[in-house]
Amino acid sequence: MALWGGRFTGQTSDLFKQFNDSLPVDYRMAEQDIVGSISWARALATVNVLTAQEVADLEKALTDLLAQVQADPAMVLLDDAEDIHSWVEIKLIEAVGDLGKKLHTGRSRNDQVATDLKLWCRQQGEDLKSLLANLIDELVKLAEREQDTVLPGYTHLQRAQPVTFAHWCLAYVEMFERDVQRLNNALELMNTSPLGCGALAGTAYAIDREALAKDLGFGRATRNSLDSVSDRDHVLELLSVASISSVHLSRMAEDIIFYNSGEAGFLEMADDVTSGSSLMPQKKNPDAMELIRGKCGRVVGSLTGMMVTMKALPLAYNKDMQEDKEGLFDTIDTWTICLQMAVLCIQGIKVNKERTYQAAQQGYSNATELADYLVAKGIPFREAHHIVGVAVVAAIAEKKPLEELPIEKLKEFSAVIEDDVYQHLTIEACLEKRVALGGTSKERVKEAIAAKK
């Protein structure tokens, strides 16, 4: 039964109903719609639309319906209602008769859906903060375990300078902490209640919208009814945070995929997050990380789709906005499982310390140390940079690392080089010189781990 049929004399086509109805998607907001309806009933009592007894009867019926939905969310899908708002109202009328028809007084589906979706987004945001915290915790644990493990650092996928495996872990901790901060910012921005704004011009009843907002758990009521019913910034904010966080997850996945490869051999992923080949018995594929990397594109696509949907909509509500939920719900599901899977993957990582150390020794990653050594001897950095570049060419020709070139050979590049140069060219020396805040020295990494813990 449609809630708007009085204006129409003709029948809705089956195709239009299928095209128009949103219950298969927005049924996920059943709890929020019921909670919002309970608060609205209380608000109507304050303006003498409902009696105290009527509110009590409505609240009991709605609370019973809420319990049914929580026990079996899929029960909603067995109905033929247009959307979740219609479904709740129809079920309420079945429970309390004509009293259920009074609940929608002064309320529109426009402010109703805006409220429901904000409530849903806020709950998801809090849940996702916990999931991000779990991932941060596992990365800090891995960093603590591998704080003495040397790892080659890369730029342009070329070995650059040695770091520690812990320093790599903490780099992603920084990224995911920023995601938590973005979530907090988004939650603060959506901490306003649109309920009581009606279809677009506000409700005709003298509802105390600030009290109504507090009853729903919001910080305050929105300030403009036109904006309130057509605002979907909360959806865009959540999609934006999800997209940025998914990019971080994807970058981490790419690193782990590379580190897990036969060419690198820096780590091994656990059996419970990898798969084999149907043809090649020897294969152990990093499928979990590849799926995380792949799913990022779908999340970013949902953000793009919603931005394009909203970019030219006139005030106030337009049916286009019904497209706000499908991509959002899919994004939250995807982001959630990717965070959970990332935690499982991190927990099972085994690092090959010998291989990472060997790799850090290769690629002339101590070249910058030799340049710094020359600078300390009074040579301008640009000149020292050139000298070391020539020395690296010679070392490559002899197929030796810089630290294995004899002192006589090194002196050919600069007369200021002495025997003390070798103590500056070890991996340990390269690491320990990075003592500034944010550097990869053991001291700084240990401090960073303690701070994160």
Image: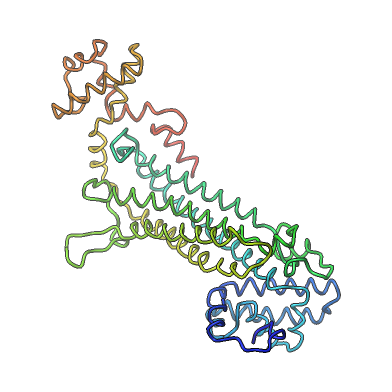
| Residue plotted at (13% across, 26% down) | 398
Image spot of residue 430 (x, y percent): 32, 28
Image spot of residue 325 (x, y percent): 55, 68
| Residue plotted at (81% across, 67% down) | 207
Residue in the foreground of this view, choosing between 396 and 141: 396
Q: Relative to 106, is 391 on the left or the right?
A: left
Residue in the foreground of this view, choosing between 254 and 224: 224
Image spot of residue 302 (x, y percent): 49, 61
Residue in the foreground of this view, choosing between 220 and 200: 200
Indicate whether 238 appears above or below 96: above
Count the numbered circles shown.
0
Image spot of residue 272 (x, y percent): 31, 62
Q: What colour-coding does the image apply?
A: rainbow
Q: Relative to 432, is 37 on the left or the right?
A: right
Seen as rendered, the residue at the extreme left is 398
Indicate whether 319 appears above or below 166: below
| Residue plotted at (59% across, 62% down) | 121
Q: Please identify the quarter of the rendering in which residue 413 is found.
A: top left
| Residue plotted at (39% across, 44% down) | 169
Q: Relative to 233, is 218 on the left or the right?
A: right
Indicate whether 450 appears above or below 132: above
